[in-house]
Image (cartoon, rainbow, N blue to C red):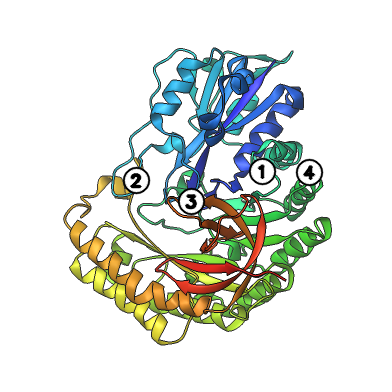
Amino acid sequence: MKVAIIDGYVDEPACFGVPPYISPYIRYIAGALVECGIGRDDISYFTIDGIRNSKREDLAPLSRSDLVVILSGMTVPGKYLRSSPITLKEIEYLCRATSGVKVIGGPIRLGYSSEGGMAASTLEMADEDVFVARQDIEAFVHDIIGPGPCIEDPDNVEHRMRTVGEIGRWADRGAFIIRRHPDFPNIMCEMETYRGCGRDTHCSFCTEFFYGPSTYRPVEDVVTEAGSLYREGALYFRLGRQPDLFTYHALDCGDSLPGPNPQALESLYSGIRKVAPGLEVLHMDNANPATIATYPDECSKIMKTILKYHTPGDVAAMGMESADPAVIRANNLKAMPDDVFEAVKLMNEIGSIRGDNGLSHLLPGLNFVHGLAGETKKTFGLNYDFLKNILDNDLLLRRINIRQVMPFSGTPAAEQALPLAKNRKIFLKYKEQVRKDIDLPMLRRVVPRGTILKDVLCEVWGEGSVGTFGRQMGSYPILIGISEKLPLGEFVDVRVTGHGFRSISATVVRE
């Protein structure tokens, strides 16, 4: 039995899988197939970019497959340097062009939209050999494989969520699939510590609550997965698949906000370092600023643990979403502006020291969402003023992400009359002002002129010029324009020569 996995990429609030990242879902699917008795050599793996760039003969394993699994889903779509997520038209084409049973799943089960500011549409496929996994795709794929192995009738298979125990096994058994990625070995392995939101109430627009309450993976399972990936040749890791790393294995403090567990993070980080001693990058993603502001002592311990074991250039994205108290209350957002400011300040105090790759060890990033209920013209001014206050207090932010809400069916945002179009012109003007007045001076502080940045991966050549664009491997890497044409896939050290709003220019440092 032959199976093809197509990676159409995922981008969720708490998971990223666009090259050079590979999501954990791909590895879970591969591991589930192996557990069902399908040999590794009978599993082929394609990225959607690879399919676009391939010759017909290179896609023969795809056309011969008995089962085609398509992973996709952009619930917080962004802009990507050299990859484009799969489109609905491409999904439809691949379903027509392949003869096997097709299973589509991932975050796309929640809906599909090409950009923020537009409501997501429900994915419906009419073909009789195409099935949409309405819950976890890895569990559905596992359950449709019967003895032999063979494909059971998908119509008779229950849609369900996978268990923590299952992904512990599947992540280990599916680690081999990373070697099939076209960017290997230069890939970031996104790893899951837990999923599901631990808050009593949820942000109006967020899709994380669809995964239910927080379900924590055992420390030993995550460490085992890291070891398996390392033995397969992985060098770049990110603990990114969770809504708030600071509440991994959280403690019940009798409050609506779970309490951090510093010992769990110490065990996790030290364990990963033991099984992957030669790793090049160990980064994180996602921190709830309310957790840090409410539990500063515990979170300080966690930050110091991170600095002890990680690699510099780390970023903790904080979902602030809005500095307008009216918007915060109307959408059950996580933290008030004062809480976010304190979280940013504490992380700067501990993490802003510069590391050996040229970047600060651990900096916060801030996410803003516009088009939410309660938003008025005043909201844009409050957001801008908050960011200006961060700048004026000499605090560092690695990134400021500004996007428009993408309402998904089943979230409160989908039921509300949102001011998406009404404030469109104001939004664009405000975004430009933030880029000019905040991003530019902030970037000059984060990487001053003359800073040497090490191990920059050359990724694409500039159009109409002799230059090269590259990034360091890691969380939210800075885009670097290098003033000469260099071999793609090569790592170089560079010296910063100038700054744009969200990128820098540099020259190669040669011995």
Residue 370 location, x and y as percent? 30, 59
Q: Residues within 10 Å of mark 4 (few under 14, many from 20)?
A: some
Vertical placement of residue 365 versus 486, above or below: below
Q: Quadrant of residue 27?
A: top right
Q: Please state which amino acid type lies under the numbered disc 3.
A: Leu
Residue 362 location, x and y as percent? 60, 72
Label 2 residue SS: loop
Q: CA distance from mark 3 to mark 4?
A: 26 Å
Q: Are marks 2 and 4 in contact (CB under 8 Å)?
A: no
Q: Quadrant of residue 454?
A: bottom right
Residue pointed to by mark 4: 232
Residue pointed to by mark 1: 164
Residue pointed to by mark 3: 81
Q: CA distance from mark 1 to mark 3?
A: 33 Å
Q: Residue at x 67, y 76 (%)?
A: 355
Which of the two discs, 3 and 4, labels the residue nearer the N terminus?
3
Q: Is residue 293 left or right of residue 117?
A: right
Residue farthest left in this picture: 422
Label 1 residue SS: helix
Q: Would residue 283 be visible to someone looking at this image? A: yes
Q: Residue at x 20, y 55 (%)?
A: 419
Front one among 429 and 494:
494
Residue pointed to by mark 2: 115
